Image: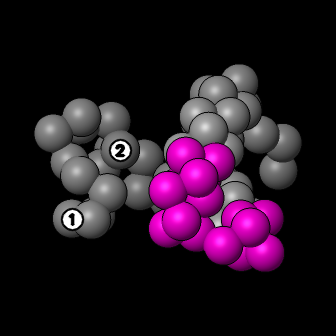
Amino acid sequence: MMATESHKDNVSAFKGLVQHLHEANRIAERDADSVILQYKKFLEEITPIHKSAFLDSSNRVDSL
């Protein structure tokens, strides 16, 4: 399945977040690629199934 523009934007923003977490010594550099791949998989496989849950901006990731 091809990523949408929104997914590309989300992945770019997430990569920035991962970089900040690495700089803060919260994510090891060796784990960064794996974390990003897991996020991409989440966007591709989970968000289409539960799209309505992600349209409501009051939902938090940890409550989904």
Decide whether residue 4 is among the magenta residues.
Answer: no
What are the residue bounds of the magenta stretch?
Answer: 18-33
Estimate the x, y position of residue 7 in percent, counting from the top left.
65, 36
Comparing 17 with 54, the one in front is 17
The residue that disc 1 covers is 63
Foreground pick, 41 / 36: 36
In whole angstroms, how far apart are the C-alphas of marks 2 and 1? 11 Å
The residue type indicated by label 2 comes to Phe
Q: Any mark on residue 54, and which?
A: 2
Q: Hey, what amino acid is under mark 1?
A: Ser
Q: Position of residue 37 (x, y in %)?
A: 74, 64
- Residue 30 in percent (x, y) is at 78, 75
Label 2 crowd (10 A; few <14 / some 14-19 / many >=20): some
Image side of residue 57 versus residue 12, left or right = left
Provide the secondary structure element on which disc 2 rests: helix
Element on which disc 1 rests: helix
Position of 31 with respect to 45 (left or right) is right
Quadrant of the image occupied by residue 10: top right
Taking the spot 20% from the left edge, 48% from the top edge, the residue there is 59
The dominant secondary structure in magenta is helix
